Image (cartoon, rainbow, N blue to C red):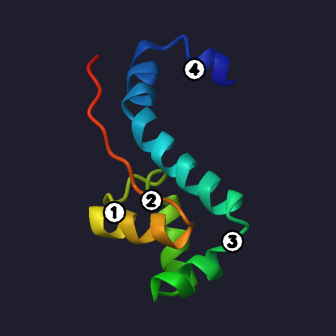
Amino acid sequence: MIDEWKKDPEFVAEYDALADEFALFDEMLRARKNAGLTQADVAKKMGTKTPAIARLEASGRHKKHSPSLATLKKYAEAVGCRLDIRLILR
């Protein structure tokens, strides 16, 4: 079904527009799993509750507001990482 959708230029444009957001949230999940942590573990380290972490990790997929830079830094620290933001020429 996805292969059929990818023939539609409008679908491809929308999908491509979300690629960076999907990449960010995929990276967050990968970092948490590599650290061997659950959402509850990360929540405890960040001083918040598990549902907040679930919302944070799902926010890119549900077109909700983007997390703040401070939140991303706290998440990175909680999973044993350093946040690295770069601007890359196209």
Position of 89 relative to 23 (above/below): above
Which quadrant of the view contains residue 6? Answer: top right
**Residue 12 at x, y = what percent?**
45, 20
Mark 3: few/some/many CA within 10 Å (<14, 14-19, 20+): some
Q: CA distance from mark 4 to mark 1?
A: 29 Å
Q: Secondary structure at mark 4?
A: helix
Q: Earlier in the sequence, mark 3 or mark 4?
A: 4
Q: Secondary structure at mark 2?
A: loop
Q: Earlier in the sequence, mark 3 or mark 1?
A: 3
Q: Earlier in the sequence, mark 4 or mark 2?
A: 4
Horizontally, residue 72 falls left or right of residue 3, namely left
**Residue 76 at x, y = what percent?**
47, 63
Q: CA distance from mark 3 to mark 1?
A: 20 Å
Q: Secondary structure at mark 1?
A: loop
Q: Which residue carries the number 2 mark?
A: 59
Q: Which residue carries the number 4 mark?
A: 5
Q: Nearer the viewer, mark 3 or mark 1?
A: 3
Position of 83 relative to 52 (above/below): above
Q: CA distance from mark 2 to mark 3?
A: 19 Å
**Residue 30 at x, y = what percent?**
63, 52
Q: Quadrant of the N terminus?
A: top right
Residue 37, numbered label: 3
Residue drawn 56% across and 47% down?
26
Residue drawn 51% across and 60% down?
81
Looking at the rendered structure, the number of numbered marks drawn on it comes to 4
Q: Which residue carries the number 1 mark?
A: 67
**Contact, CB < 8 Å: mark 2 with mark 1?**
yes
